[in-house]
Image (cartoon, rainbow, N blue to C red):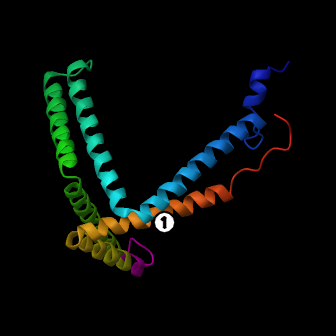
């Protein structure tokens, strides 16, 4: 005897019910259209996009700090030292969020410096991998390391221009990814739902 509930669970992954396919397709279309719009906005208005990112980042930090402070008071199983640590960390994170909101463009410069430092460290690791021979071919490690270090230094020297370039590149990539999503949507089912 076959249980109707388990019969759908063991179906092949490609054999979605027509209603499920329609919902999935609708979600993909919505996400792709939103991605296209955001990508175009990022390319046309990079300064406003950066300001929005900085403001959202500041709000996120404030919310995260509040969460940690609340957790310090209400979380079960935390010792006194962990409660103090969580509360103080939350307070520091909240202050960082307030500072980000008070001067959003300055927080973007800090973000650019952090990205630059990460790229420099990544470049050093790639260069070491090329020298030691852990990256094959070796020249790839050297090229990757040099490019990463150069990009990191550029972010230190021109942080505002570097962040603007990242927004523009991100906008272009968002448009490309969204367009390919629209072009590769699952086909509509011919059967009635």
| 26 vs 83: above or below | below
Q: Quadrant of residue 181?
A: bottom right
Name which residue lies at 83% across and 21% down. 2
When the figure is inspected, residue 120 is found, relative to residue 66, above or below; the finding is below
Q: How far across and down, in percent of the image, does residue 75 sit?
A: 26, 20
Q: Is residue 118 left or right of residue 182?
A: left
Q: Is residue 15 above or below residue 170?
A: above
User: Where residue 14 sits in the image (x, y, percent)?
Assistant: 75, 44
Quadrant containing the N terminus in the rendered view: top right
Please state the total of marks drawn on the protein image.
1
**Which residue appears at 37% of the width and 57% of the height?**
49
Residue 138 on the magenta span? yes
Q: Nearer the viewer, residue 8 or 29?
A: 29
- Residue 17 visible, this orientation: no
Depth check: give the residue in front, 175 or 141.
Answer: 175
Extreme bottom residue here?
139
The quarter of the rendered structure image containing the C terminus is top right
In this rendering, the answer to whether 124 lies above or below 114 is: below
| Residue drawn at (23%, 64%) of the image | 117
- Could you tell me residue 53's position as x and y percent? 33, 52
**Residue under label 1:** 172
Q: Position of residue 36 (x, y in %)?
A: 54, 57
Question: Which residues fall within the magenta stretch?
Answer: 133-141
């Amino acid at each position: 005897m076959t249980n109707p509930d388990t019969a759908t669970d063991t179906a092949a992954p490609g054999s979605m019910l027509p209603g499920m396919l329609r919902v999935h397709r609708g979600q993909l279309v919505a996400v792709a259209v939103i991605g296209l719009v955001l990508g175009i906005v990022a390319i046309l208005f990079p300064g406003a996009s950066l300001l929005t990112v900085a403001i959202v980042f500041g709000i996120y930090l404030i919310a995260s700090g509040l969460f940690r402070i609340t957790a310090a008071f209400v979380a079960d199983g935390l010792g006194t030292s962990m409660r103090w640590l969580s509360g103080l960390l939350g307070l520091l994170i909240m202050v960082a969020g307030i500072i980000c909101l008070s001067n959003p463009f300055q927080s973007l410069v800090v973000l650019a410096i952090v990205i630059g430092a990460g790229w420099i460290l990544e470049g050093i690791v790639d260069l070491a991998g090329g020298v030691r021979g852990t990256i094959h071919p070796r020249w790839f490690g050297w090229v990757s390391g040099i490019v990463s270090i150069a990009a990191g230094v550029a972010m230190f020297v021109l942080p505002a221009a570097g962040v603007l370039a990242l927004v523009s590149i991100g906008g272009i990539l968002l448009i490309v990814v969204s367009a390919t999503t629209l072009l590769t949507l699952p086909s509509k089912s011919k059967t009635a739902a």
